[in-house]
Image (cartoon, rainbow, N blue to C red):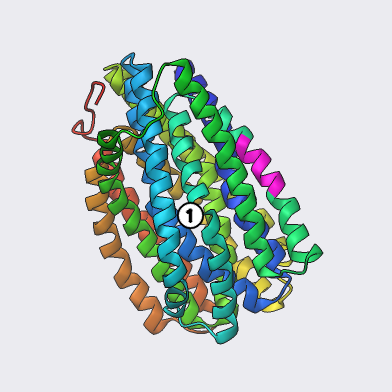
């Protein structure tokens, strides 16, 4: 048990720093833009929802790569592991360029779907259009991170993410306030930081490939393999993003104050989620490596300990969130109504964090096992449970309590459905497939 704990911490602690850096990019943007006014903050809420949807849908670039690389490494095939990671980088670049070009045409129509005011829509479109320049870099960073995680190395992504976050703060302050670019300056600063991170990670991956004699040319079969293995994960992630996008749409219908508060609340939730997801990342890497080595008892031990770590960490984070709930408002907004709404939502969110911890670690274990088909199918089932709850909030909730009902549906209804489907699967052995593939 102590050996498993050491392995979990060895991977989870550095992964925590790297994962937290990603939402900290958005938290920095939120804090800086929040003091520009309510319309820019609400606009950021719509733009970030769209960007996070694209990134979330393509997270399979990491989630499909990590278990594949880990299984090959566990079976003793280090060159094959690196080759799989290189193919993932090529796929990330291709997808990034393609989606950025499509986004130039689709950005404003997509923003209009949320039905915000003219000022909110203008701010959202501007932030989104500038951010598209960094989309290929975002995807390259995701794919490279998956490669290093599969190689049981979470330290390299941590160092790169920390440097990128520091650069992002300096660039955003300079562009927003120094150059007077407003919300566009925030997006531009993040774009520059992301391309710097991508360049560093690709350089390290190239050096590793040369050390193992692995070609850097894209292998069409390998690229197709990464894309195919990520297909079910794409469906799984699409169901997650659909749930959050639908939630943003309902928050938009309540008004600018509610949307602004919901934007900050979801940003905080994703920050906590990334903290808990560090354990899930350790679960992915360790599960894939152990199954590659055909060590089933170790897989069971890893899962048991991760569940304990996930729930325990959720309790600690929930207590910290509740304790800080009434001082969060002024950090993210100058509007008293937004501050009051955020304090109430944060208290409600704090109660559900342990449940989220349970969900995230089991999700990581099953991803590491390559059980993507089950995750995709049950993801659609969970969404089917959530949408009627969300519809009830839309039609019947009103006033100051509306945003609380919205978060209750999301934090307990949707996350609770995921807990049931993941818990049932974890009790079986169908997902424990051993071997290099």
Residue at the outermost front position: 217
Q: Position of residue 360 (x, y in %)?
A: 42, 44
**Residue 343 visible in the picture:** yes
Vertical relation: 136 (above or below) 306: below
| Stretch of the chain drawn in magenta | 160-167
- Residue 412's quadrant in the figure? bottom left
Specify whether residue 161 is painted magenta.
yes
Quadrant holding the C terminus = top left
User: How many residues crowd around disc 1 within 10 Å: few (fewer than 14), some, or many (20 or more)?
Assistant: some
Quadrant holding the N terminus = top left
SS class, disc 1: helix
Q: Tell me if 54 is positioned left or right of 118 in this view.
A: left
Residue at the outermost left position: 430
The overriding secondary structure of the stretch rendered in magenta is helix
Q: Tell me if 37 is positioned left or right of 414 in this view.
A: right
- Residue 432's quadrant in the figure? top left
Judge by depth and name the residue closer to the eye, 203 or 252: 203
Q: Tell me if 221 is positioned left or right of 262 in this view.
A: left
Vertical relation: 263 (above or below) 96: below
Residue at the outermost right position: 178
Vertical relation: 225 (above or below) 123: above
The residue positioned 50% from the left and 51% from the top of the image is 353
**Residue 316 visible in the picture:** no
Q: Position of residue 430 (x, y in %)?
A: 18, 33
Q: Position of residue 29 (x, y in %)?
A: 65, 60
The residue positioned 58% from the left and 72% from the top of the image is 126
Q: Which residue is mark 1?
A: 352
Specify whether residue 176 is painted magenta.
no
């Amino acid at each position: 048990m102590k050996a498993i704990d050491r392995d979990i911490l060895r991977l989870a602690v550095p992964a925590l720093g790297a994962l937290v850096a990603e939402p900290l990019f958005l938290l920095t943007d939120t804090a800086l833009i929040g003091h520009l006014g309510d319309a820019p903050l609400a606009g950021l809420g719509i733009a970030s929802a769209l960007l996070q949807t694209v990134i979330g849908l393509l997270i399979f670039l990491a989630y499909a790569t990590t278990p594949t690389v880990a299984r090959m490494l566990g079976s003793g095939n280090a060159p094959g592991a690196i080759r799989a990671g290189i193919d993932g980088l090529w796929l990330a670049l291709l997808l990034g360029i393609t989606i950025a070009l499509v986004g130039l045409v689709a950005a404003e129509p997509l923003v209009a779907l949320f039905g915000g005011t003219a000022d909110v829509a203008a701010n959202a479109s501007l932030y989104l259009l500038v951010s598209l320049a960094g989309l290929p870099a975002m995807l390259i960073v995701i794919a490279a991170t998956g490669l290093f995680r599969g190689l049981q190395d979470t330290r390299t992504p941590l160092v790169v993410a920390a440097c990128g976050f520091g650069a992002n703060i300096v660039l955003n302050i300079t562009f927003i306030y120094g150059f007077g670019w407003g919300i566009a300056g925030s997006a531009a600063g993040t774009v520059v930081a992301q391309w710097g991170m991508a360049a560093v990670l690709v350089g390290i991956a190239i050096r590793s490939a040369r050390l193992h004699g692995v070609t850097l040319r894209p292998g069409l079969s390998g690229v197709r393999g990464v894309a195919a293995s990520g297909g079910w994960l794409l469906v799984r992630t699409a169901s997650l993003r659909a749930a959050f996008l639908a939630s943003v749409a309902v928050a938009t219908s309540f008004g600018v104050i509610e949307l602004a508060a919901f934007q900050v609340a979801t940003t905080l939730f994703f920050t906590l989620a990334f903290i808990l997801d560090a354990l899930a990342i350790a679960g992915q890497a360790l599960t894939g490596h152990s199954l590659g080595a055909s060590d089933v008892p170790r897989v069971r031990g890893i899962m048991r300990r991760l569940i304990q770590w996930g729930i325990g960490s959720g309790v600690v984070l929930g207590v910290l969130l509740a304790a800080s709930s009434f001082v969060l408002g002024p950090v993210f907004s100058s509007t008293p109504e937004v501050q009051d709404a955020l304090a109430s939502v944060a208290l409600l969110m704090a109660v559900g964090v342990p449940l989220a911890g349970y969900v995230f670690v089991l999700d990581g274990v099953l991803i590491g096992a390559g059980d993507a088909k089950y995750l995709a199918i049950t993801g659609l089932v969970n969404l089917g449970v959530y949408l009627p709850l969300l519809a009830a909030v839309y039609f019947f909730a009103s006033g100051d309590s509306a945003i609380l009902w919205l978060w209750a549906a999301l934090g307990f209804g949707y996350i609770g459905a995921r807990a049931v489907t993941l818990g049932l699967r974890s009790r079986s052995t169908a997902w424990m497939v051993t071997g290099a593939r």
